[in-house]
Image (tube, rainbow, N blue to C red):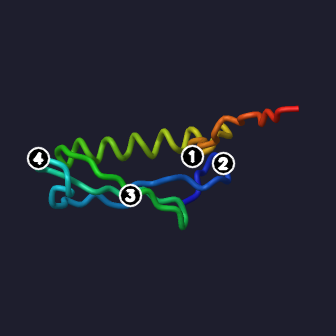
Amino acid sequence: MQNKNTSRPVYELISVDKIDTPAGLEGDNWYRYILGQGTSKIDGLRQGSLKSVTQHAEEYSKELNERIRSGGSTYSTRKKPQVQDKKAE
C-alpha cells in the first residue's frame, strides 16, 4: 500500500459490509467500513446506503492520506493543559 508519489504508506478502503443496527442506536441500513494502512486498521460505522457509506469511507481515507503527506499526524492530540502547581510559601 505505497503511494507512487511518496514512500509513505497510504490508507485504503478494505471493505464495507452491511451490519445489524449497533446496540444503543436506531434505524436500519448500517454498515461497517474498514480502512487499512499496513497493519494499522480503522474500523468505522455509518448509517446510509452502500454507495453513500463507500463514498464517505473513500473521502475519509483521502483526508487521512493528505494529512500524512503534509506531515500531520493521523492521531488527534489528547494532551491535557498543564496546570502549574502553586505551593504556599
Q: How far apart are marks 2 and 4 (CA)?
A: 41 Å
Q: Where is residue 38 in the image (x, y as percent from the top left)?
A: 55, 64
Q: Which amino acid does label 2 sit on?
A: Thr
Q: Nearer the viewer, residue 30 or 87?
A: 87
Q: Give whichever of discs 2 and 1 has the lower sequence position.
A: 2
Tell me, yes or no, whether the two marked residues, 2 and 4, touch with CB atoms within 8 Å: no
Q: Which of label 2 and label 1 is nearer to you? A: 1
Q: Distance between the residues labelled 2 and 3?
A: 25 Å
Q: Which amino acid does label 4 sit on?
A: Gly
- Using the image, determine if residue 83 lies above or below residue 42: above
Q: In which quarter of the image is the C terminus?
A: top right
Is 61 left, or right, of 22 in this rendering?
A: right
Q: Give whichever of discs 4 and 3 has the lower sequence position.
A: 4
Residue where numbered disc 3 is placed: 43
- Using the image, determine if residue 54 lies above or below residue 87: below
Crowding around mark 3 (Cα neighbors within 10 Å: few <14, some 14 to 19, many 20+) is few
Tell me, yes or no, whether the two marked residues, 1 and 3, touch with CB atoms within 8 Å: no
Q: Give whichever of discs 2 and 4 has the lower sequence position.
A: 2
Q: Which of label 1 and label 4 is nearer to you? A: 4
Residue where numbered disc 4 is placed: 27
Q: Where is residue 29 in the image (x, y as percent from the top left)?
A: 13, 50
Is 25 left, or right, of 36 in this rendering?
A: left
Q: What element carries label 2?
A: loop
Q: Residue furthest right?
A: 89
Q: Which amino acid does label 3 sit on?
A: Asp
Q: Where is residue 80 in the image (x, y as percent from the top left)?
A: 63, 39
Residue where numbered disc 1 is placed: 74
Q: Which residue: 65% across, 53% down? A: 8
Q: Where is residue 71 in the image (x, y as percent from the top left)?
A: 68, 40
Q: Residue furthest bottom?
A: 39
Q: Is mark 4 on a helix, strand or loop?
A: loop
